[in-house]
Amino acid sequence: GDGGGGSGVNPPHRILSWDMEPGDCLLFHSRVLHCAPANASTVHRRRALSTRWCGEQSRYAAPSGCVGIGYPNFEVPLVDGGSMVCPAFPVVWPRSHPLRPPYDPDKKTIAGGGGGGGGGEG
């Protein structure tokens, strides 16, 4: 449902929810404020998968005060201002792939696909 006015959020925002069934998947941007009620089941565990996607030209920006990043299964050679491409952050769909449509960053469109719709670099 959607609400807002009496939600206790200040200032009021539109609150959305979806009825979910086992096996359903909900995707959203990580900067979207989100939550879920506690899992009341004593038998079934809740699972979550978090992924990060970025373009091939993305560069790592070390958080201030960062003394290192722990990726126990990978040697991660991330340096401030350096490429994100490494075993922990592989290129999934390279620009050179024959089925990948060309992207025009000036127009923010995919060739032949019009505008809008998430045609991002990466």
Image: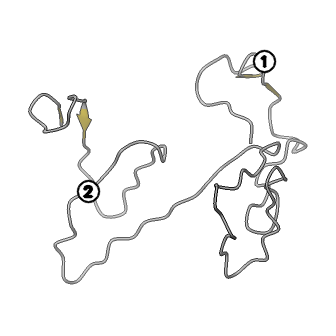
Mark 1 element type: loop
Relative side of 60 to 8, left or right: right
Quarter-of-image position of residue 109: top right
**In the image shown, does 82 or 35 lie closer to the viewer?**
82
How packed is label 2: few (under 14 Cα within 10 Å), some, or many (20 or more)? few
Mark 2 element type: loop
> What residue type is disc 2 on?
Ala
Vertical comparison of 18 with 70: above or below: above
Q: Where in the figure is residue 36, as x and y percent of width and height? A: 26, 56
Q: Where in the figure is residue 57, as x and y percent of width and height? A: 82, 42
The outermost residue toward the left is: 6
How packed is label 1: few (under 14 Cα within 10 Å), some, or many (20 or more)? few
Residue identified by numbered label 2? 36
Q: Where in the figure is residue 70, as x and y percent of width and height? A: 65, 75
Vertical comparison of 108 with 46: above or below: above
Quarter-of-image position of residue 118: top right
Q: Earlier in the sequence, mark 1 or mark 2?
A: 2
Please tell me the numbered disc located at residue 106: 1
**In the image shown, does 41 or 66 lie closer to the viewer?**
66
> What residue type is disc 1 on?
Asp
The residue under the point 77% across, 44% down is 58
Quadrant holding the C terminus: top right
The residue under the point 31% across, 77% down is 45
